Image: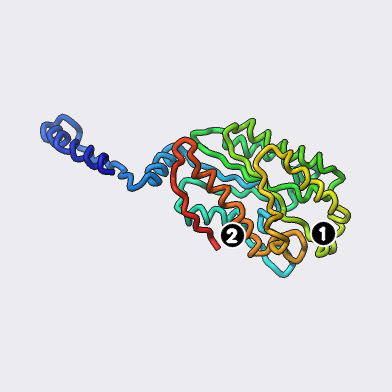
């Protein structure tokens, strides 16, 4: 800061001399004053483009209600809360793009592989999107299909490989469901996931084969899951955000390139 101010002071006499003698055009040039390393970083990043935190998920990411009496959580879904937490911590020039759709699966009839390829391709340009973080939160709906745990893991890795093919420098996180509460399933959900408890356990036993960082939310317990045994409560969305946020912020504030800001964790409740 001292060196910056000294540089400005030393330039003022010379600039005034040039203006008086008509050597330069009389224009006011506003120089951004870097009050901190973080502000300078944000200024440089804004000139380059906007960083994207892409959440590609299913109904839980979309804020689907956990019972018929509860409305969709909307802005209180965990991806939306992630965006609010970034703002609360002064992390600028990052946008959370929540592309979560109820019923979406990794494969099968509800998969959206073509859509995923197009979506990642939109962020290939490193000038427009200097940094990309993908949070993949899919796989629960796949448990209802005639499939195996190995096939589900292979499908997860397909999404990882496509992202890396388009953006080799992207950071990728895979977030698991905390666990279906089979005793709460009823009606449509009971028919859909009947007899799938063993398959769910087999998938978790193979998570070490996922080719990216895995955030296993089973550590949160089943209390974050609501009445239908599948979808998160309002407090569950907050708990999920608080679980994911430290991992995301660590990536954002890492020492890659110019990313050397200090983190002050201030989670949105």
- Residue at the image point whose x is 71% and y is 64% from the top: 223
Residue 32 sits in quarter:
top left
**In this view, which residue lies farthest toward the bottom?**
69
- Residue at the image point whose x is 58% and y is 42% from the top: 133
Horizontal side, residue 141 vs residue 39: left or right: right
Where residue 113 sits: x, y (%)? 72, 39
Disc 1 element = helix
Q: Earlier in the sequence, mark 1 or mark 2?
A: 2
Quarter of the image with the N terminus is top left
Q: Could you tell me how far apart the alpha carbons at marks 1 and 2 are, in whole angstroms?
A: 25 Å
**Which numbered disc covers residue 113?**
none
Where residue 171 sits: x, y (%)? 59, 39
Residue sitting nearer the eye, 35 or 30:
35
Local packing at callout 2 (Cα closer than 10 Å; few below 14, some 14-19, many 20+) is: few
Horizontal side, residue 138 vs residue 254: left or right: right
Residue sitting nearer the eye, 51 or 246:
246
Quarter of the image with the C terminus is bottom right
Disc 2 element = helix
Local packing at callout 1 (Cα closer than 10 Å; few below 14, some 14-19, many 20+) is: some
**Which numbered disc covers residue 189?**
1
Residue 197 sits in quarter:
bottom right
Q: Which residue is mark 2?
A: 75
- Residue at the image point whose x is 72% and y is 47% from the top: 138
Where residue 173 sits: x, y (%)? 64, 44
Residue 114 seen in the current view: no
């Amino acid at each position: 800061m001292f060196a910056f101010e000294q540089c400005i002071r030393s330039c003022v006499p010379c600039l005034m001399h040039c203006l008086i003698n008509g050597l330069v055009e009389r224009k006011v040039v506003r120089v951004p004053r870097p009050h901190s390393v973080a502000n300078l970083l944000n200024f440089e990043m804004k000139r380059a483009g906007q960083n994207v935190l892409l959440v590609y998920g299913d109904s839980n990411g979309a804020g689907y209600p956990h019972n018929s009496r509860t409305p969709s959580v909307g802005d209180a879904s965990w991806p939306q809360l992630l965006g609010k937490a970034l703002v609360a911590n002064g992390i600028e020039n990052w946008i959370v793009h929540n592309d979560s759709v109820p019923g979406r699966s990794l494969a099968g009839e509800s998969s959206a592989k073509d859509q995923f390829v197009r979506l990642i391709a939109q962020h290939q340009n490193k000038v427009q999107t200097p940094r990309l973080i993908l949070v993949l939160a899919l796989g629960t709906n796949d448990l209802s299909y005639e499939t195996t745990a190995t096939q589900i893991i292979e499908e997860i890795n397909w999404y990882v490989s496509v992202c890396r093919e388009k953006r080799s420098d992207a950071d990728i996180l895979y977030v698991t469901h905390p666990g279906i509460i089979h005793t709460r399933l009823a009606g449509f959900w009971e028919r859909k996931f009947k007899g799938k408890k063993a398959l769910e356990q087999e998938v978790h036993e193979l998570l070490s084969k996922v080719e990216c960082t895995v955030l296993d939310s089973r550590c949160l317990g089943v209390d974050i899951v609501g009445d239908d045994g599948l979808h998160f409560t309002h407090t569950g969305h907050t708990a999920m955000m608080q679980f994911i946020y430290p991992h995301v912020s660590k990536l954002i504030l890492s020492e890659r390139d110019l990313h050397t800001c200090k983190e002050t964790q201030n989670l949105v409740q």
